[in-house]
Amino acid sequence: MKKILYLTAALLCAVSAAAVAAEAEPVIARQTVAQTVAALKEKFPDQADRIAKGVNQVARVWTAGDGSAADFSAFCAANFLAGAELDATFDNIESQFEYIDGYFRAMWTKTHHALDVNTGPLRPEDRIFASYAPSAHLQDDMFATKLAFLVLLNFPVRTLEEAEEKGASWSRAQWAQARLTKLFAYRVPAEVSRKITQALTAAEEYISGYNIYMDHVVGSDGKPAFAPGLLLQSHWGLRDELKGMYADPGRLAGQKLIYTIMQRIINQEIPAGVINSSQAFWNPETNTVNGEPAAREPDTRYQTWLNVFQAYQLENPYYPEYPTHRARIFSIDREIPEARAQVLFEELLDLKAAAEVGALIKGRLGRELLPFDIWYDGFKARSAISQDKLDALCRDRYPTIEAFHRDIPSLLRKLGFEAEKSEFLASRIEVENCRGGGHAEQADMRGEKAHLCVRFNADGLDYQGFNTAMHELGHTVEQTVSLYDMDHHFLRGVPNSAFSEDFAFIFQDRDMYELGLQNTGGKTEALKTLDSYWSAREIAGVALVDMQAWRWLDGHPDATAGQFRQAVVTIAKEVWNKYYAPVFGVKDSPILAVYSHMINYALYIPDYPLGHIVAYQLEDYFKTHPLAPEMLRMCRIGSVIPQEWMKQAVGAGVSARPLVNGALKALKEI
């Protein structure tokens, strides 16, 4: 079934580029625009600047299917608004969009439920429903009804440069209006959006089903190397199992074996028959199955990634200023230009601080560093406690999903939230048992719930699950506050996914505190800073690999999956050799390419290092300010651009330097 889905996704992307480009061509002549502007200025002489901007905004996205030049002029003449009428129109649009966005989000969550939540074996129709995008035609409908044109005629589209230069002086209503016009600044046909959704859904299914039966992984002695019943998803489960082994130095062999598994996955050398299967015993070191050579998985990993890239290529003609997915996701979605993000990540990868922290880790481990030590977990208090004890504690506390849900108010009160607010937040969060490693799904309308999805085992929530659940709880609390406590619907949320990750990291970092195991020694804060720095530095390299892989694809749009695999492995080794080999003393490791997010989330990974960077700035702020009330205040700032949000939140823009300096300072205290 998977192979059919991937082939289907590839075929769906095979749309005529010429037809797409032709569909994106403007049809309103400059003369028509000038005449329309002149006529409106006679009627509204005090609105000259607004008129010129609005008419041009409409002309830019008006197509032949919307009407003739005469229809265009007539529409503008009949729908330009000013004064109290303009304000009332905006209020009405915002109110209606809360229902539209809210119900579409609820439909999306419901149709994806079987794919996301472990309700039993997937049925054929579950995959079909998951590929359905309820809001795929929304933008088309808004243009067909001409509501989109009314918005563009009356409210200005703001560029990122304009927002960074002037946004500090904008009112809340002006920010909300800027978020409204952003919805229609570019016109992408529903069919293109549908094909992107199908490619992403196929990728999500591939990743969700990428499990390794670790009790069927054997070592050099031919015996199972891991505990019975241990099933780990790539990459999350493999990584977290490896991290948990730092509490027991005797499990180094197991860590090395997991690292070998990861390399087999990255290089696409893993035997096809051992993925999500317990039918045979696999020796990753010799790469044999039941002692015999076995056929590898074809380049499915890279073909799936390639299918997602090709689907996003279909959007390119509709964004003349941002003709690649890279440009769009950084400048439009994140509102942090790619070049600036690159500088932030390179600043985070500073070799001086890394060398000193690496030397400290080497001394603590009592051995030379190995590539998988990018996930060194020894700065956390839990590293002194065995994985088995932590698992037992969490399972005893959370034997069921309901037990975790009931405990959410207590978890929040311990973080400083008032009792009434804690109960309210818990009542607006649905906890579910997911198929994957864990995620959070926001609501878009008051009255709906955010969904916290985490993997529960038959015997309860283990420590890895609790750690993930705390991360997702941070997401859902942010999502709920920034929806229910927001003054404008169009400002709900935070600037981008990285900022939601900030609060997720902050909650996740307090997992041991919530379990009553927080280390209270004098070096706790220094160790916490080093842990944040090392984690941020690890994912910054992964982000650079993700970004460079997409750059390579932009330059090689017709590449085969095999060619792309070779390119990704080469890129991963180059990033490793530049930023990690000088610290680890090992060259040419491809480990940075193991992340599953690269396959199914289309350049989402840069949100993680951005999240770590901002999270540290927030954590530094929370050292002298109470977490709960300040988080509530910050979440009410809403989805303004990142630089403006940070200035309002902590009084400074986004910078990696505080985290690097914090690590250097922490080293002196250890």
Image (cartoon, rainbow, N blue to C red):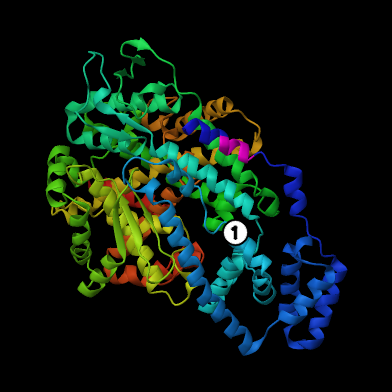
Instruction: Report the magenta stretch's main SS.
Output: helix
Query: Is 15 drawn above or below residue 413 in the view shown?
Result: above
| Image position, residue 221 (x, y; %) | 22, 13
Q: Residue flagged by tag 1: what amino acid is it?
A: His
> Is residue 267 found left or right of 138 in the rendered image?
left
| Image position, residue 47 (x, y; %) | 73, 84
Is 406 in the magenta?
Answer: no
If the image is split into quadrants, where does the C terminus sit? top left
Local SS, label 1 = loop
The answer to whether one can see residue 625 in this image is no
Task: Name the residue rendered at 26%, 40% in the picture.
Answer: 377
**Magenta part of the chain:** 8-13
**Along the line of sight, the residue nearer the viewer: 283 or 300:** 300
| Image position, residue 608 (x, y; %) | 41, 49
Task: Name the residue rendered at 44%, 77% in the picture.
Answer: 487
**Which residue is denoted by mark 1 in the rendering?**
137
Task: Name the residue rendered at 88%, 69% in the picture.
Answer: 31
